[in-house]
Amino acid sequence: MKPRMRNETIKKGGFDSAALGWLVRFWALAAFFYWLDHSSWFKTLVVAPYARLSASVTAHLLTLLGVEFQIQGTSLTVSGKVFVVADSCTGSFVFLLLAAVIIAFPASWKEKLIGLAAGLFTVVFLNLFRTLMIVLVAARFSGSFWGLHIIVGQALIIAGTLAVFVWWAQGVGRGCSVLPINSRRMFMGVALYVVGFLFSYGLYTFFLNSPVGIWFKDLVIRHAAVVLGLFTETTQQGQVINTARNSIRVIHDCLSSPVLVLFLAAFFILPLSWPRRLLLYGACFFPLYYFYHVGRTVVAIWFMAGGRDANFAYNFFGQVALVKALLLFSVYYWAGQRKVAAIGRQLILLLVLLLPAAALALLVGWFWQDCGLPFLASFAGASEELYDPGRIVSLMPLFHTFAWLVLVMTTPLWSWKQRGGWALAGGLGLNLFFALLVIVLYALGLAPHPWLIKSINVALPFVIYFEVVSRIPNPA
């Protein structure tokens, strides 16, 4: 006997009863959700509060991008133009229509819940992106509102929800989980890291304001003065450190860094038992704070000339530390996780490539400083150039070129020819991304929050690299 299939077809006349049942359930649910979306109580309880939330989140994103605005309820005023997040702009019916398709589909409720969660996340994310795009572009170019709102925005939402359904339905159709094991592990890793970040941020904030934190800050100042005294004549009076080169008052508020929160959050995703993770977390908390800030204070004071905003060490110490940590993680990835190379060989190769990669990165940085950015500024008719170490964005190509070259040239599964090809292609792509980013910043008059640019500086080449190499199978 043949086993019964879940979707059994009545072959007489080519009639598919399962498909008909799905269509009947879908249209019934679609009609019900249409009535629900247009009912006054649903609009009052769900749609209207979400419209206000959407406007509020868009306002926070505008703050992150350095855009001045005014908000009142669901109305945003940017550059004298008023934009209203109406109930019809929330994407509520789009999600309900997707929900009707998924609920009517012949799948288990576990699979349906995964599809609904993925659909809700997609609609919310794309709708926020659509709102932000319309506000940013239409505030600068008023003639673009209709096209962005009616054509581009709706096409984006429809294409996104359709893609989610196709992805979900294909997973169900193959008889397997719609969330593959690798994706599930990646999702759990990201979720744990977010939890670790929130926990570390709260603990770090409490520590900085506690008597122990204040004592540690004074300890950092005293020991930074001692270290500087090894190289030049140095005296310390309270929070003021006097050297032969300058006199600097080390403010307690400057002895904190989000970089440490990023480091500490990584303990939550270590492949260890929870007691060991927490034990290692506690053992490393104070040494990380102490050594990081002593080093940062010494380097910042040594190079403190021309003000804080122009001080490379002050603005980029944390980013350099994160890049070094991620490069060391790449050594662990190939030697400890993928087990395709010896850890000593990977470490030596990385150290050998640091200087050549830095030299090429400095060459790229010089090109953008002297040629690329002035050209883009004149092309966009901007009144000022973006080259300013304190504004961070100008050194993005230097960071990206350096990290990408070291990562690619230390990849053990590629031949030297492949490494060269990936180095060239990735380097060109990252620099093209920078050029497009600068054009957008000029065109829309944006001044992004420094930590948004810092995050892109550090994370982008590593995210692209590990996404590429994770797809390469180990040799048999």
Image: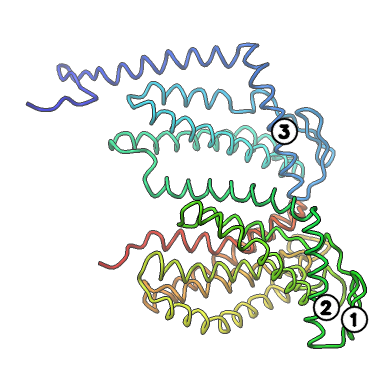
Residue at the spot 67% in from the left edge and 61% down from the top edge: 259
Cα–Cα span, label 2 and label 3: 49 Å
Which comes sooner in the sequence, label 2 or label 3?
A: 3
Residue corresponding to mark 1: 235
Q: Nearer the viewer, mark 2 or mark 3?
A: 2
What amino acid does circle 2 point to?
Ala
Q: Residue at x 62, y 15 (%)?
A: 42
The quadrant holding residue 39 is: top right
User: Callout 1 environment at 10 Å: few (<14), some (14 to 19), or many (20+)?
Assistant: some
Q: Secondary structure at mark 1?
A: strand
Provide residue 325's location: percent of width, then percent of height.
Answer: 57, 68
- Could you tell me which residue is drawn at 52 percent across and 71 percent down? 328
Residue at which label 3 appears: 55
> Where does the C terminus fall, quadrant-wise?
bottom left
Task: Report the amino acid beneath label 1.
Answer: Thr
* Residue 63 picture location, percent across and down: 77, 46
**Position of 104 relative to 201 (above/below):** above
C-alpha gap between disc 1 and disc 3: 53 Å
Q: On the rendered structure, is 396 left or right of 465?
A: right
Q: Tag 3: residue type?
A: Ala
Depth-wise, is mark 1 or mark 3 nearer the camera?
Answer: 1
What crowding class fits label 3: few (fewer than 14 Cα within 10 Å), some (14-19), or many (20 or more)?
many
Secondary structure under tag 3 reads helix
